[in-house]
Amino acid sequence: MLSFKRWLERVLLVLMAMMLIAMVCLMLWQVAARYLLGVPALYTEESLRFLMIWMALTGSAYCFGANKHLSLDLIPSLLPEKAGRILYLINALVVLAFAGLVLLWGGWQASMSALNQVSPIMQLSMGYVYLILPISALLISVLQLINVFLIMTGRLRLPYAKSSAEGF
């Protein structure tokens, strides 16, 4: 299970890197077309916006899987190991509820209701743009469930656990 988690995290990193490379190339083309050729490339701004949305939500899934998301860990780091695991489990349940209700259900509803709406320049269905919401919800849920299983079975350390060499 740990190997699947690491593989999925690597896939997400590669996807984000490819999206970032595409964004840089599109931005360079936009600047070159506007200032060197004198003709603005209209599709680049819309493409950059859509890629930024997809990259941000893919990155959030990666951060939840790798336990690198923004968190306040003062209180959990002061707790004993068992209480820290219980707090982690409660936090994971809140994340799963949010991912399931808001991102998965709400994102699916938004995606399906926007299938007939098209973007102004590229004429791309906005439902495809919004599809990243349920996709990221599934990724977050899978990675969060794997993390909970690995932490509860002791095969993965709590993200805020101190090593024996660390002090306060």
Image (cartoon, rainbow, N blue to C red):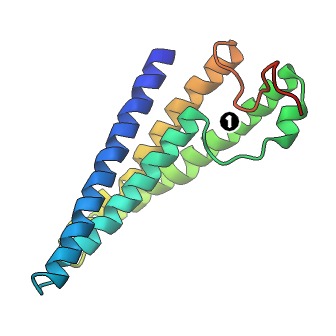
**In this rendering, is residue 10 above or below 44?**
above
In front of the other: 78 or 64: 78
In front of the other: 168 or 157: 168
Residue occupying the point 45% across, 55% down: 56
**In this rendering, is residue 17 above or below 80?**
below
Quarter-wise, where is residue 95 in the image? Answer: top right
Residue occupying the point 80% across, 33% down: 87
**Residue 44 on image: x %, y %:** 22, 71
Residue occupying the point 28% across, 46% down: 18
Q: Does residue 116 show up?
A: no
Quarter-wise, where is residue 111 in the image? Answer: bottom left
Residue occupying the point 68% across, 35% down: 92
**Residue 126 on image: x %, y %:** 30, 65
Image-based side of 119 in relation to 139, left or right: left
Q: Does residue 92 show up?
A: yes
Quarter-wise, where is residue 43 in the image? Answer: bottom left
Q: Amino acid at mark 1?
A: Ala
Image-based side of 142 in relation to 111, left or right: right
Image-based side of 167 in relation to 13, left or right: right
Secondary structure state at the residue bearing disc 1:
helix
Q: From the image, which quarter does the C terminus lie in? A: top right
Query: Label 1, on which residue?
Result: 92
